[in-house]
Image (tube, helix red, strand yellow):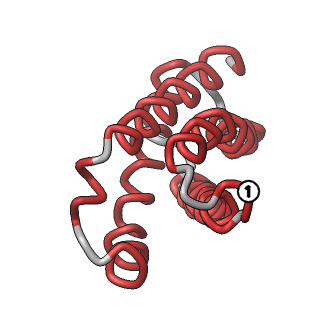
Amino acid sequence: MLKNWKSATSYGVLLWLLIFVEVSVLMFMPALTGKELTQNILHMIILPVLVLFCAWMYFKNTPASAKDGFLLGVYFLVIGTVLDLLITIPLFVKTFDFYKEIWLWLGFLEVIVVCTLVGYFKK
């Protein structure tokens, strides 16, 4: 069970916002326009840094363990999914095919792995 829901929620929303901005920059960067594979690879490189920052900040004032990190990663995914369902899909993507993308699922895995590792090493 997460020990600080308010902080976890705040950092989950922050992570979603950081990812939203990062993906938007990659999508509209002239040098990357139409280069979806390159955009996705760059996102997979940048994403762990964003997750590391948010998880590290959460565990700055909260006791940590690998289990706590795993739960934080799952909670970050729940928050991100809710925000995607409320904002990203209706306003930008317009289709739930968004969830069929392998890159999205790889990103989900990265979030859980990075949060788990942060929890493990911060203990």
Residue at 35% of width from left, 78% of height from top? Answer: 86
Q: Which residue is mark 1?
A: 31
Asked if residue 12 can be seen in this view, the reply is yes
* Above/below status of 67 relative to 93: above
Q: Residue at x 36, y 53 (%)?
A: 78
Instruction: Examine the rendering and report whether any part of residue 10 can be seen.
Output: no
Instruction: Looking at the picture, tell me which residue is in the foreground, 10 or 29.
Output: 29
Count numbered badges in the picture.
Answer: 1
Q: In this image, 5 relative to 103: left or right?
A: right
Name the residue furthest bottom. Answer: 91
**Quadrant assignment for the C terminus:** top right
Residue 25: x, y in percent? 69, 63
Q: Where is residue 70, by image quadrant?
A: top left
The amino acid at mark 1 is Ala
Image coordinates for residue 120, horizontal then vertical, percent: 61, 16
Say which residue appears at 60% left-offset and 56% top-offset. 19
- Decide: is 22 above or below 103: below
Q: In the drawing, does residue 29 fall left or right of residue 99?
A: right
Secondary element under disc 1, as helix, strand or loop, is helix
Q: Nearer the viewer, residue 63 or 83?
A: 83
- Going by the image, does 6 lie left or right of 28? left
Q: Horizontal and vertical percent for residue 26?
A: 66, 57
